[in-house]
Amino acid sequence: MEPTYTKTGLTEGSHCSVCGEVFVAQEVVPVLESPSAEIDAILPGTWDLWSIYDPAESINLNGISDSGFKIIIKKGGTGAFIGTQFTYPATWTFDRIEDGIFIYSFIMDVDGSDSKSDLAYYDDTLFLALGTGILGFKKI
């Protein structure tokens, strides 16, 4: 069993299937070292909306300007999601890596209630899953 960023793993080991005698004992493999500190050095700053993809509407707009949507990320896991007429305080925590994409929990305080979304960092872009669509942000 392979280790993850939150759980230990085990080596394969072997034993007799008849009597149960252990030939090679399983050993605990420590959790993977989180790359979040290295990513935390990259993410803090202001990110400006750059693309929108909404599969329900078949919309994929790149190079958007004057959208008014921004994400501000500060060290220590705090920040904000900012629109033209709102600012939602937010917190974010590193969750996992999937296929080289760094995934974070991004929780916005929307009018007193939490709204959790996935925030992904890949290829110098932040992707925020919001509703049926995905917003892409580039650092400014």
Image (cartoon, rainbow, N blue to C red):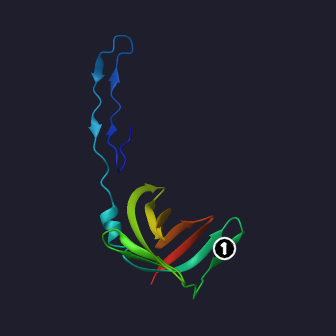
Q: Pinpoint residue 95: horizontal percent, then vertical percent.
A: 40, 57
Q: Quadrant of residue 132?
A: bottom right
Can you say which quadrant of the picture contains the N terminus? top left
Of residues 60 and 106, the one nearer the viewer is: 106
Q: Residue furthest right?
A: 57
Numbered circles on residues, count: 1
Of residues 50 and 90, the one nearer the viewer is: 90
Q: Residue furthest front?
A: 112
Q: Residue furthest bottom?
A: 66
Q: Secondary structure at mark 1?
A: strand
State the residue at coordinates (35%, 16%): 16
Judging by the rendered image, the residue that carries numbered circle 1 is 60
State the residue at coordinates (30%, 47%): 31
Q: Pinpoint residue 54: horizontal percent, then vertical percent.
A: 66, 68
Q: Pinpoint residue 13: horizontal percent, then vertical percent.
A: 33, 28
Q: Amino acid at mark 1?
A: Asn
Of residues 125 and 116, the one nearer the viewer is: 116
Q: Pinpoint residue 50: horizontal percent, then vertical percent.
A: 56, 79
Q: Quadrant of residue 89?
A: bottom left
State the residue at coordinates (39%, 67%): 91
When the figure is inspected, residue 33 is found, relative to residue 72, above or below; the finding is above
Q: Quadrant of residue 11?
A: top left
When the figure is inspected, residue 105 is found, relative to residue 23, above or below; the finding is below
When the figure is inspected, residue 18 is found, relative to residue 98, above or below; the finding is above
Question: On the picture, is 44 further left or further right than 138?
Answer: left
Can you say which quadrant of the picture contains the C terminus? bottom left
Q: Residues within 10 Å of mark 1 (few under 14, many from 20)?
A: few
